[in-house]
Amino acid sequence: MLKKMGEAVARVARKVNETVESGSDTLDLAECKLVSFPVGVYKVLRDVTDQIHLITLANNELKSLTSKFMTTFCQLRELRLEGNFLHRLPNEVSTLQHLKAIDLSRNQFRDFPEQLTTLPALETISLEENYIVDVPVEKLATMPALRSVNLRFNPLSSEVRVIAPPLIKFNMLVSPEGARPPPP
């Protein structure tokens, strides 16, 4: 157990160091068994946070993200959080004014994260395979850059399915009512 934990920590450290040393605009911490964003990473990346435009934290065990994460990486263009245990986003997600794409697929969202509707550059939202019933269609309809919202395999209300099409100018991907995702 300790050996596996040590390997996971070493993997995170290696990936963070690669980002700093290469001057990359990407931080990829996917599949690192993270239960939270490592606090030490903020210190290591403090001189390069403004140049990081893509963070991948996919397929970890995250239950939440902190407001510090959002305000530290406020220059993000893309945030990939699919395959975690997230059920809400901090209000500070509204500081991600340059964010173009967010992937929250395969998490635990029961409510649509409405803070996303305040992001002017956001083009793509993926919330596939969550537990969302209601969607703020009117707010989404006013988002200037929005092109696609993926809500497949969510138990959307019939009201959302009826109201949305005439109001929206973006692609809203939904599954047939009652459809289930394929087994992993």
Image (cartoon, rainbow, N blue to C red):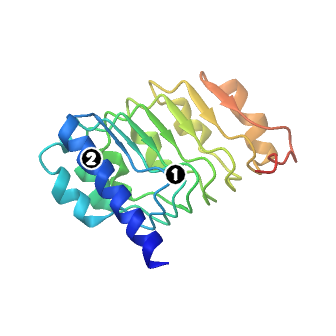
Residue at x 51%, y 58% (from the top left corner): 60
Residue at x 50%, y 54% (from the top left corner): 31
- In terms of image quadrants, where is residue 144? top left
Q: Nearer the viewer, mark 2 or mark 1?
A: 2
Identify which residue, 178 or 165, lies in the foreground. 178
Residue at x 22%, y 57% (from the top left corner): 42
Residue type at mark 1: give it: Pro
Spot the residue most to the front: 3
Q: Give x and y (percent) for residue 66.
A: 35, 63
Q: Give x and y (percent) for residue 27.
A: 33, 43
Q: Above or below — where is 31 with respect to 174?
A: below
- In terms of image quadrants, where is residue 18? top left
Distance, label 2 to label 1, CA atoms, is: 19 Å
Identify which residue, 177 or 179, lies in the foreground. 179
Q: How many marks?
A: 2
Q: Give x and y (percent) for residue 169.
A: 60, 21
- Circles 2 and 1 in contact, beta carbons < 8 Å: no
Task: Name the secondary structure under disc 1.
Answer: loop
Left-right relation of 153 to 76: right
Q: Above or below — where is 169 with respect to 143?
A: above
Left-right relation of 105 to 157: left
* Residue 113: numbered disc: 1
* Residue 152: numbered disc: none
Spot the residue most to the bottom: 2
Look at the image and tell me whether residue 40 can be seen. Answer: yes
Left-right relation of 81 to 18: right
Q: Above or below — where is 35 with respect to 101?
A: below
Residue type at mark 2: give it: Phe
Task: Name the secondary structure under disc 2.
Answer: loop
Spot the residue most to the left: 47
Residue density around tag 1, few if under 14, some if 14–19, many if 20 or more, within 10 Å: some
Residue bearing the label numbered 2: 73
